[in-house]
Image (spheres, helix red, strand yellow):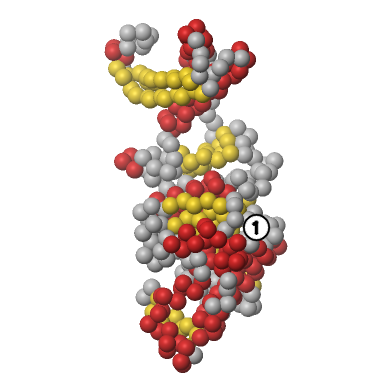
């Protein structure tokens, strides 16, 4: 099971900051540092869900409350965007002191703008992902546009943000204007994933376009279709986390020698959702929503069909290569269903229900009729096919 641990560390201004580790129960593939949105906290539902889903994929995630927010000490009114960046750097230093230097930075909303600035100053970082991030930190000023004149004339004002009062000082506004975000993004020097909802009404998707265009390759964009700015729907947060984890694996360090031997399946708090470790690889299994799941992964029978389909394709490829036949590609489609034994003319079972797998194989390439016929025979010889037709014994023991 995924585990969480609360910790404290010293922020850039000397305040005590509250942090939380969300860690896999097995081996750790990489460590991520998560930066939350403006005036939010590490305990936002989206932050927790993303951290949890990343841990299921073997990525330990460290999230913390910026100075003056959440459970962290200090006075928010004395902070700025620059101090947020400095807090991020302090968090990265803390992670390094724990032997867990971050290789992935993730930032939500203004936290995304902060990680884009901080990334170049954290040597261990290999990849950066942003969620609903503004292209420029000045964008946040629209949240208190009606109070900006008062802030500038009187030096500060108490504004209402998400229904809560916050003191904003003129120094905060002045600091926002000092950051050349486009230049920082252009010099990022790390793989970048930009994620944004097309209908985000807090930070428009035009910001994602600006970030993407300013960045150099490697860079990617994923649309969070249907999501709101705070990713309040559970499915949206988990989808974002799965996409980040899948994308980041290309850029993160190789898995350690502690990769699990064989296959390990770990249940989660999300009812049918399971994390699967296969050596150094990770998958998610789930059930569709109509069955009470979250539909964020294939169900067990779909995984079984995938195993048979992959084995079929690999076996045909191996045989064709050995024979030097012009097989270009293999397309295998499979379906599973339960049928009455009495409806099966060539089955040994006479009563009750039996499992039937229907497999369709399309062979592409200039093969002659004899070669095609032989390959269809070979399909039944793939190891998984043989296992399904042989006597299988499952030995179960409690540990």
Q: Can I make out residue 142 in this image? A: yes
**Element under label 1?**
loop
Near-viewer residue (252 or 337):
252
> In the figure, is residue 294 to the left or right of 66?
left
> In the figure, is residue 139 to the left or right of 73?
left
Residue 160 occupies which quadrant of the picture? bottom left
Residue 262 occupies which quadrant of the picture? top right
241 lies above or below 163? above
User: Where residue 1 appears, x then y in whole percent?
Assistant: 53, 47
User: Where residue 197 appears, x then y in whole percent?
Assistant: 41, 57
221 lies above or below 85? above
* Residue assigned mark 1: 189
Q: Can I make out residue 47 in this image? A: no
User: Where residue 232 appears, x then y in whole percent?
Assistant: 39, 59
* Residue located at (33% from left, 22% from top): 338
Report the residue that reaches farthest toward the bottom.
154
* Residue located at (54% from left, 19% from top): 327
Number of numbered discs overlaid on the protein picture: 1
Q: In which quarter of the image is the C terminus?
A: top right
User: Where residue 362 appears, x then y in whole percent?
Assistant: 44, 20
* Residue located at (44% from left, 57% from top): 196
Check disc 1: other Cα within 10 Å, few if <14, some if 14-19, many if 20+: some
* Residue located at (42% from left, 87% from top): 149
146 lies above or below 365? below
């Amino acid at each position: 099971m995924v585990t969480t641990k609360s910790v404290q560390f010293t922020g850039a201004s000397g305040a005590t900051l509250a942090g939380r580790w969300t860690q896999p129960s097995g081996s750790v593939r990489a460590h991520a540092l998560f930066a939350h949105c403006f005036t939010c906290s590490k305990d936002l539902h989206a932050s927790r869900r993303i951290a949890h889903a990343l841990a299921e994929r073997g990525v330990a995630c460290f999230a913390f409350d910026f100075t003056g927010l959440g459970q962290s000490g200090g006075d928010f009114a004395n902070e700025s965007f620059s101090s947020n960046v400095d807090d991020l750097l302090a968090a990265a230093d803390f992670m390094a002191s724990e032997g867990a230097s971050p290789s992935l930075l993730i930032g939500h909303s203004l936290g995304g703008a902060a990680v884009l600035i901080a990334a170049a100053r954290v040597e261990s970082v290999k990849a950066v992902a942003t969620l609903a991030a503004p292209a420029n930190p000045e964008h946040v000023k629209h949240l208190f546009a009606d109070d900006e004149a008062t802030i500038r004339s009187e030096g500060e004002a108490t504004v209402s943000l998400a229904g809560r009062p916050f003191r904003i000082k003129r120094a905060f506004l002045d600091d926002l204007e000092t950051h050349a975000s486009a230049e920082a993004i252009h010099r990022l020097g790390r793989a970048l994933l930009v994620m944004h909802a097309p209908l985000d009404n807090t930070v428009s998707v035009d910001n994602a376009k600006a970030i993407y265009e300013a960045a150099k390759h490697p860079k990617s964009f994923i649309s969070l279709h249907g999501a709101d700015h705070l990713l309040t729907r559970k499915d949206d947060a988990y989808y974002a986390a799965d996409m980040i984890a899948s994308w980041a694996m290309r850029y993160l360090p190789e898995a350690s020698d502690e990769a699990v031997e064989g296959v390990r399946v770990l249940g989660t708090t999300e009812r049918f959702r399971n994390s699967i470790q296969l050596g150094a690889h990770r998958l998610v299994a789930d059930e569709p929503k109509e069955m009470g799941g979250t539909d964020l992964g294939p169900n067990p029978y779909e995984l079984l069909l995938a195993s048979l389909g992959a084995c079929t394709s690999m076996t045909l490829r191996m045989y064709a290569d050995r024979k030097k036949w012009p097989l270009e590609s293999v397309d295998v489609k499979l379906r599973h269903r339960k049928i009455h034994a009495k409806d099966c003319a060539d089955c040994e079972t006479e009563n009750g229900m039996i499992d039937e797998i229907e497999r369709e194989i399309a062979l592409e390439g200039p093969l002659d009729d004899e070669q095609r016929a032989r390959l269809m025979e070979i399909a039944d010889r793939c190891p998984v096919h043989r296992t399904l037709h042989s006597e299988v014994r499952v030995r179960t023991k409690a540990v």
